[in-house]
Amino acid sequence: MGPIDFLVHFTNFLAPALFLGLVLPLAARLVLRGSRGGRFWPQAGLVALAGAAMLGLGLWVFGRDGKMATYAAMVLAAGSAQWLLARGWK
């Protein structure tokens, strides 16, 4: 596999986490008017990082990409990170 192929595969692997990283902070700002999440880009980056970590963990545990359990864990991790960053317990 060449470097271009690797880059394409790697970005396709991370695409769901990056999508959630952008959508969750934006949705929190639109839905929850008093959202205390802080600045958008650092929050989006941390949520995407939590999702990407779960994708990597799922790849390591299952030995392959694309398992629904991995995607469920990614959504749970990204949602939990968003909840923590927005101080959802208050």
Image (spheres, rainbow, N blue to C red):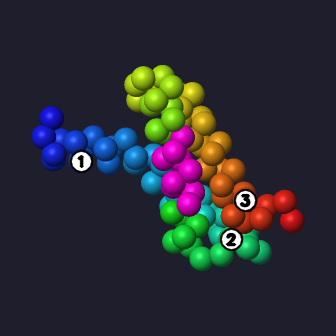
Q: Give residue 26's position: percent from left, percent from top.
A: 58, 66
Q: Give residue 81's position: percent from left, percent from top.
A: 66, 55
Quadrant, the C terminus: bottom right
In the rendered image, the vertical position of residue 53 relative to residue 72, given as above or below:
below
Judge by depth and name the residue closer to the eye, 8 or 19: 8
* Badge 3 vs badge 2, beta-carbon distance below 8 Å: no
Q: Give residue 40's position: percent from left, percent from top.
A: 56, 73
How far apart are the two marked residues, 1 and 2, measured between alpha carbons?
32 Å
Left or right? Give the position of 13 relative to 38.
left
Q: Which residue is mark 3?
A: 84
Q: Give residue 51's position: percent from left, percent from top.
A: 53, 47
In the rendered image, the vertical position of residue 51 relative to residue 36, given as above or below:
above
Q: Which residues are magenta?
A: 46-54
Which residue sits at x=73%, y=73%? 36
In the rendered image, the vertical position of residue 58 relative to residue 46, given as above or below:
above
Type of the residue with mark 2: Gly
Type of the residue with mark 1: Leu
Which residue sits at x=63%, y=45%? 77
Which residue sits at x=27%, y=40%? 9
Assign a secondary structure to mark 2: loop
How far apart are the two marked residues, 3 and 1, measured between alpha carbons?
31 Å
In reply to whether residue 60 is colored magenta, the answer given is: no
Left or right? Give the position of 53 relative to 75.
left
Assign a secondary structure to mark 1: helix
Assign a secondary structure to mark 3: helix
- Identify the mark nearer the N-term, 1 or 2: 1
Q: Which residue is mark 1?
A: 7
Left or right? Give the position of 72 relative to 5.
right
Q: Which residue is mark 2?
A: 37
Type of the residue with mark 3: Leu
Crowd rating for badge 1 (residues with CA inside 10 Å; few <14, some 14–19, many 20+): few
Left or right? Give the position of 63 relative to 46.
left
